[in-house]
């Protein structure tokens, strides 16, 4: 940190690599890492007109912000491209139907009760204390048989074919099925559950959605709230052995239980964090593995190293590329003066490749010393479900290698396209071929 903050704000050029990333140019979305390197070298803390935020790209500067949840609020963690930000635009806009405006106003009302990701101390500490028992190491261990069973069932569905689209057939339904079962959602609603999840992530990292896309988004968001409002009422009347009942019954001495609005917003975050990011982690990990024959051989020979591999994939291919914070008072980050009320975009994926934090940062190194990455955040807001995601990814990779001989990418299909988001690293498809099971 510099002793003398800069007073003239550096601005990221619109035609820079990062500017192209914000414009969702396919090449930049597919490989944003040169743009991140340029930020670290030329604009480590700089203003983005497009984001209306300060972009922070060096590891230590990001860590400094994450260490202080009071000075840097998480109230708008998803930034200008969140569902809540869209709702604020739509709620009173005559461009949309009254039904869509009503749905947007419902989202705004619920968002007035921020939870976990979007919440600051001391409320955040209360909420985390109430829900953290559901994510203890013991609970995660108890989930393992269910994760393994789901992985095997999915592979059973395509093992005899000799080919699969690994995202649609495996990386997506694995965490989706696990979180759905945890939330008590029946298998018959799985496609609807996925549509709801897509709605909550559709606007994240995409600054320009059409009116039709926004209308469809809020329709799905409203359906989600309706469904879980009914399920919460059922669990109050008749408790079950699931997460909904755990949340309803959670108590801390001297603290208020979770409100209905808090519960609904938490379920949104569990839905998204419980499947979207894990899908992205599994698919990115497998793509990297299937483009490195030596690494594939190493992990087949020594499966105990798969956990280190997953950790490096988190660092190199962070499913969430960054998050936002808001300065609560005039401050300084990386030698740059930041005014109160300004937003900051913390580029986790850039910090994860900072050469001052990771020697040879672009290389995949199976070494436990690389585990201080930022993929799950740091400090008070470190991801509550991080160990669940790690375990799902480890089981996914291990099971695929165990059960599919000769697995490789299908070179007749495209496995390079990513979804249009500068915040979520989401591979669109991963076609594979292998020796069919006899």
Image (tube, rainbow, N blue to C red):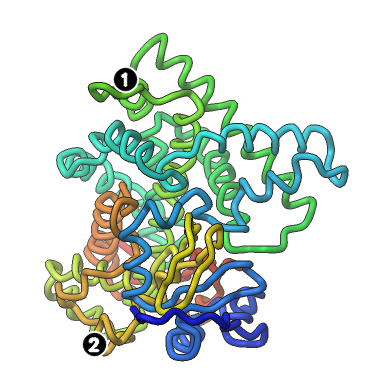
Q: Residue at x 31, y 25 (%)?
A: 246
Secondary structure under tag 2 reads loop
Q: Residue at x 34, y 15 (%)?
A: 239
- Residue at the spot of label 1: 249
Q: Position of residue 293 (x, y in %)?
A: 28, 85
In depth, the one of 326 and 128 nearer the eye is 326
Secondary structure under tag 1 reads helix
Q: Residue at x 39, y 74 (%)?
A: 287
Q: Position of residue 100 (x, y in %)?
A: 76, 37
Give yes or no for contact between labels 2 and 1 (Cβ–Cβ under 8 Å): no
Which residue is situated farthest in the top direction here? 237
Q: Residue at x 59, y 82 (%)?
A: 12
In depth, the one of 438 and 389 nearer the eye is 389
> Mark 2 and mark 1: span between their CA atoms?
47 Å
Q: Is residue 184 left or right of residue 402?
A: right
Q: Is residue 333 left or right of residue 304?
A: right
Q: Is residue 324 left or right of residue 391?
A: right
- Residue at the spot of label 2: 359
């Amino acid at each position: 940190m510099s002793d003398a903050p800069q007073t003239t704000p550096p601005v990221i050029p619109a035609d820079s690599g990062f500017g192209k990333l914000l414009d969702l140019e396919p090449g930049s979305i597919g490989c944003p890492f040169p743009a991140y390197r340029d930020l670290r070298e030329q604009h480590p803390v700089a203003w983005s007109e497009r984001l209306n935020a300060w972009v922070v790209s060096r590891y230590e500067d990001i860590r400094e912000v994450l260490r202080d949840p009071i000075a840097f609020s998480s109230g708008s963690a998803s930034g200008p491209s969140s569902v809540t930000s869209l709702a604020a635009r739509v709620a009173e806009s005559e461009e949309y139907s009254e039904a869509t405006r009503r749905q947007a106003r419902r989202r705004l009302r619920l968002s007035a009760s921020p939870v976990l990701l979007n919440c600051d101390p001391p409320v955040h500490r209360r909420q985390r204390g109430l829900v953290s028992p559901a994510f203890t190491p013991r609970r995660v261990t108890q989930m393992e048989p269910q994760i393994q069973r789901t992985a095997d069932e999915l592979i059973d569905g395509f093992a005899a074919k000799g080919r699969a689209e690994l995202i649609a057939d495996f990386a997506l339904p694995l965490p989706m099925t696990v979180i759905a079962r945890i939330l008590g959602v029946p298998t018959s609603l799985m496609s609807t559950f996925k549509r709801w999840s897509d709605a909550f992530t559709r606007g994240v990292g995409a600054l320009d959605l059409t009116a039709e896309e926004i209308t469809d988004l809020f329709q799905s968001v409203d359906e989600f709230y309706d469904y879980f409002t009914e399920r919460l009422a059922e669990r109050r009347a008749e408790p079950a052995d699931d997460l909904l009942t755990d949340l309803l019954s959670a108590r801390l001495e001297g603290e208020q239980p979770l409100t209905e609005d808090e519960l609904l917003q938490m379920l949104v975050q569990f839905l998204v964090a419980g499947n979207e990011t894990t899908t992205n982690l599994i698919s990115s990990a497998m793509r990297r593995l299937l483009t490195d024959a030596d690494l594939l051989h190493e992990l087949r020979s020594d499966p105990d190293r798969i956990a280190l591999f997953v950790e490096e994939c988190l660092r190199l291919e962070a499913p969430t590329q960054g998050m936002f914070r808001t300065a609560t008072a005039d401050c300084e980050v990386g030698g740059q003066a930041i005014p109160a009320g300004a937003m900051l975009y913390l580029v986790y994926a850039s910090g994860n490749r900072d050469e001052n934090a990771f020697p040879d940062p672009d290389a995949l190194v199976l070494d436990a010393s690389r585990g201080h990455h930022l993929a799950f955040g740091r400090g008070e807001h470190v991801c509550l479900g991080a160990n669940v995601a790690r375990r799902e990814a480890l089981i996914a990779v291990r099971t695929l290698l165990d059960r599919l001989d000769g697995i490789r990418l299908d070179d007749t299909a495209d496995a390079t396209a990513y979804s249009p988001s500068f915040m979520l690293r989401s591979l669109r498809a991963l076609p594979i071929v292998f020796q069919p099971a006899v």
